[in-house]
Image (tube, rainbow, N blue to C red):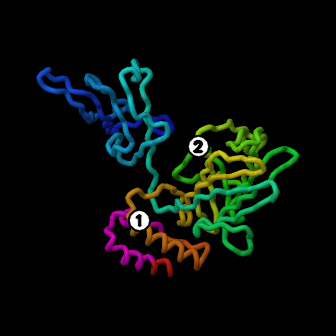
Amino acid sequence: MLDEDDNPIPGVTVAPRLHGMTVTPTVEPSYYFIRTIRRKTNKDGRFKIKGYYGYYLSFQISYRDALIKKGYKIISDNFPTRFTSDGMPNSIASPVVFRMRKLEEPTFVFEGLQRKTQYTIEFNKHTEWYNLIRNTYFYTEKTQTHDFVINGKWQESENRWVITFAPGTKNGGIQRQNKLLYTAPSDGYKPEITFYVYNKSNKYSRADTIAFEDFFDEPIEPVAPRSAYADKYYFYLISREYGIYSRISMEDPLLYVGKIILNLHVTTNPYAGQRSLELEPNISFELKKALDKEIKEAFAKDPNAIIPPPTSEMFKMPDSKIPQIMAERQRLISK
């Protein structure tokens, strides 16, 4: 059992299911069984299962007790779920590796903005502005408050699309990371990020090559083509006067004759200066609705509103106490 940085995780409760058939005297019929086997990882993050007979072992993420450690969560990417005797390793030197990540400080975050942005050669140059609190976008800047700006244009001489991501405020910033983070970086932000998308084919497909050119970095860093739909590029954004942090996930761009499509998903922490992008898993629907209303009303009055983040006690309280707590918070915000 390892974390994202290949460190062992001790004390993880491991509970695979053993699937098999009973061995009974011929006078009684055999029957199919599923048996849970429980183990805990040692200081090296290892566990061992020995002396059991059956068809196969299964580790299903849907089983809530498959892998458990307080403060940790299963990393589902490439998660192995089924093992037979032929597929299990024969040596302790080549174990099956499971991964979990340590949970960050959970809070209430917006995970609603999912945008398919499309540019065509006919327009040549196109810009969109996004307000991540209101979950809206618009095509003219005017005086509207915005957090995130996308510019896309076709560069005929180089046969490529040029895409620029930038914050919507002058004191904001953006950066690219190679992996999904649940706490936005504290530094390393730049005024904008530009990347180029190439495709040798004229058919509808995913990009052959994507090259990034970070604002102060030379030369361009090539990125190998990706085939899986789940693969993402991750950008971290800071916007507004007091620092609103967001994570922008992007799939491989889709290309067609004269057209590019960007699939984006944005997670935003609406509390000024708070970098956590970890959604509280136990938040009730009623509390989520109340916090959403509080945030949107506060930012409608002041685009740089400072709202106190919810406390851990709020996530545990019964729904009946929500109106009282929200009224107390409203008085605090008004001050």
Which amino acid type corresponds to the residue marked 1 in the rendered image? Thr
Q: Main secondary structure of the magenta part?
A: helix
Q: Which residues are magenta?
A: 308-329
Q: Decide if residue 46 is in sight here.
A: yes
Q: Nearer the viewer, residue 59 or 33?
A: 33
What secondary structure is found at the residue carrying circle 2? loop
119 left or right of 311?
Answer: right
Magenta stretch contains residue 311: yes
Image quadrant of residue 228?
top right
Q: Callout 1: few (<14), some (14-19), or many (20+) C-alpha neighbours within 10 Å?
A: few
Q: Which residue is mark 2?
A: 229
Q: Is residue 29 above or below residue 232?
A: above
Q: Are marks 1 and 2 in contact (CB under 8 Å)?
A: no
Q: Quadrant of the N terminus?
A: top left
Residue 13 position in % (x across, y down): 32, 39
Q: Which residue sits at x=58%, y=70%?
A: 134
Q: Which residue is mark 1?
A: 311
Q: Which residue sits at x=66%, y=71%?
A: 145
Q: Earlier in the sequence, mark 1 or mark 2?
A: 2
